[in-house]
Image: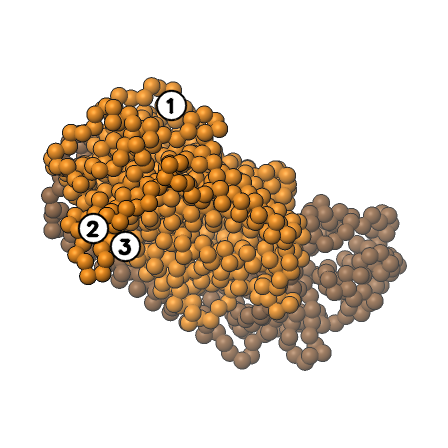
Amino acid sequence: MIDPTSSRASLNAAAVLERTWADPTGLIGWFAHVDHKSIGRRSLVTAFTFFLLGGLLAATMRLQLARPQNTLISPDLYNQIFTTHGTTMMFLFAVPVMQALGIYFVPLMVGARAIAFPRLVAFSYWIFLFGGIFLYVSFLLNAGPDVGWFSYTPLAETLYTPTKRADVWAQLITFTEVASLAIAVSIITTAFKLRAPGMTLNRIPIFVWAQVVTSFMVIFAMPAVMLASTSLILDRLVNTHFFDVERGGDALLWQHMFWFFGHPEVYIIFIPGTGIVSTLISTFSRRPMFGYLAVVLALVSTAFMGFGLWVHHMFATGLPQLGESFFTAASMMIAIPTGLQIFCWLATLWSGRITLATPMLWMLGFFAVFTLGGLTGVMLAAVPLNTQVHDTFFVVAHLHYVLIGGAVFPLFGAFYYWFPKIAGRMLSERLGAWFCGLFFVGFNLTFFPMHVLGLHGMPRRIYTYDAAMGWGTLNALASVGALLMASGVIVFLADVWLALRKPIADPAASNPWNAGTLEWATASPPPNSNFLEMPTVAGRDPLWDNPPTQPIVIGLRDTARDILVTHVLDAEPDHRYRSPEPSYWPFWTAVATTIMFIWSIFSPWGVVYGAIPILIAMIGWFWPKRPDEGGTPVWPIAHRTLPRPNEEPAPGGAL
Amino acid sequence: LEPAASAAAAIHDLWSLMLWTSTIVFIAVLVALGLALVRRRRDRPTQPIDSSAPPAAVTRTVTAATALTVVILFGFLLASLWTSRAIAEVRPTRAVSIHVLGHQWWWEIEYEEGLPSQRMRTANEIHIPVGRPVVFKVTSRDVIHSFWVPNLHGKRDLIPGYTTAIWIQATRPGQFRGQCAEFCGLQHAHMAIDVIAEPENAFTAWLESRRTSARPAGSDIERQGEAVFMSARCAGCHTIRGTDANGQVAPDLTHIASRSSIAAGTLPNTPEHLAAWIVNPQGFKPGNQMPPNLLSSADMQALVAYLGSLR
């Protein structure tokens, strides 16, 4: 099944292959796309749009807090703004943008023709988009959530929030849970079952490992918040009493359920960031990653530990000291794998030859910002210190250092690194350096003073403060920094706009950074089928390690959407599988689901009647086709993939 | 950052330890990064890949750095546990016991000192003795709040359905400001509290005087003001002990004139601010429970004079 002398791709066959994998064109066809590159692209653009919206909200808050006793915005609006800002950045930007990178690059990096379950991925995009639109329409209708992105009970209960605002928040969570769970399943399956032959478990690129670890965390963390937000909706909709203290409910139960999700959420955002850092550092040091095994194990152990320290968000609630000590120890321990990763990155840089391209500038920023954020994190793990700075601007500073340092800096590095692959054009090195510099200075100017403000006693989530408190100067400084950050982002937008006006670079630029992973083994932008000739792999960095005579995969039809399924551990070929065709049904299913979600805010009957259109749409989605209609033919007995009991497996698989 | 109680001092020591250690680690990481950059910098993406095994010295350094991380973190852990223990040791028997109840958006205070009949309720201002431990038993009447006076101790959440205790022993006299630290709705920003630490005898005298009923209205204008208070809506919500006013949903005003601010730290307690507040509370603290009161200027003058006499 593998031809050692690759010389197949005649122009004609390639054209047929491209037609087979093409998505419908035109505006209407756009709703039927199942190509992971198309969905990944639109997810990136959508998530980045939400980043801009969340950033505008943040800038508004900075304007309000720039001087004491400011009356620019009312407390009611301020509470909506900070809630929507937090919710947007966590649920509509940070998690989706990392998953969007996964949707686009995981199939390419493992050498697959498609992502697993492409219609599910398409469905998840629509759910994510509709959820985000739902939040912002509510915000514009003055019904934006105003009880914080953490929505603590009993403040979020009907008694204290009689409007629909808390429901909007809880239902947005439902949207994003569904979307991210669907993608997590697809990414895990892609990474475990669709890898190119030869890519054994210990050759998977670290970025893909990071995406897999993150996806597992999503699968374990999201059900916790689903339980929490559903209980809250039930409390509000049909008067259950999960969190109703007056009737035997428990106000603290919410916090346990929320933070059991909420802390892993931080790592769901940060672990893909570390995957990006490992990838970029290796490429620009011209060296394979130092301590591959240690780094992968560090990611996995971070994921496990991430579930064992949620209580450090609740040290001020007065829990028993022995329990608090356990969570202090766990919160400090998680710094060990992260520290190990930092040392491995430094070792790679140390033993490599460094090229300071724009993506590398972002890595330098990452080191400075993230290390500082990590160290303040260790401080927060100590109960006594935590009770002083918890819920102050110190924590605001800490979380932005960790999340912007650990995720946004790598992310912008990744934009500059992968933009040529996605768009076939380079971004400007000069504008990129300006953007990086403005953002870095602006960031530190905004958030460093907040450490001091927190230590001086300024609590979070206050819409104004008294001049006598002496917090004015530092707040003004922070607001100036926010303007610098905003101007950096404007430079970035200009850079992207200018780059997109250029013609697509010549195909020789398919690997401008001379990188080692498989996404650079194909044209920029990649063809519909990802790889005209499907690669096999002989090392961790195939483009650096593969000999010139490396075989390619043959035996997949050009006329059908065939993909190769391989074994989990050693990526030996297992069987051929037909990837689904484009379909409009994921879109209609998402529309029906959205109607049901929104209706159920107003009436419990929405769940009942709203389920009917979803059922109809899913019947359409899964309607089987006979072989003469283009469906999958019945698999012939002779092509069994698994041996019968007592039967020797066929040599080299059974394709 | 100026500790005025044993707990805050212990936390401050822990903070210094962690701050300096972390600063050293931060600088070490950045220096290593800088050296790595300077050492082998070549601005050519086309140069060949170096996939030789890394030098043993690099591997040894990474191992040592990881080991050092573990050691430092264990040091932090022990320091943290030790600080927690030092804070927890303030548990003697002769403590002043004070209930703190959170409301949207003010603090109800009740002193348990003495006989049950001597219990005393007040609002938004706490006096404590220096050198004698105080136990705050905290809970909430509505949503979650958080009691936090940075100079004295870390914060403790006020959670409906739970009553938890926090121990504080002030080491020097002074007036310390606190503020609600858990987001509690519209006026979370205007929910401050003053804690005044004073010598034992001053504290005892203060407590004695606060246990008495309100000073009866003396002059004509004060009597007129008291009548306004009783006939307008005020008495429905506020209590003035010794009069017919015994509303329970708003701060106790028995000794309002002795407090330094009104509306939980929103405004300084001067006759002008008091009058402005009574006319238009929603203008200063939008969303709070107090309705506007359009009184004639004579009535207002009388009312402010009366409230100003309640020392």
Q: Going from the N terminus, do you reach mark 1 or mark 2 first? A: 1
Query: In the image, is residue B160 above or below residue B39?
Result: below
| Chain bearing mark 2 | A
In-image side of B132 versus A375 (left or right): right
Q: CA distance from mark 1 to mark 2?
A: 40 Å
Circle 2 residue: A570
| Chain bearing mark 1 | A
Amino acid at the residue labelled 3: Ala
Q: Which chain is orange?
A: A
x and y, in percent, of residue A137 in the image: 59, 38
x and y, in percent, of residue B77 in the image: 34, 65
C-beta proximity under 8 Å, tags 1 and 2: no
Q: Which chain is brown?
A: B
What quarter of the picture does the C terminus of chain A occupy? top left
Circle 3 residue: A298
Asked where in the image residue B119 lies, by quadrant, the reply is bottom right
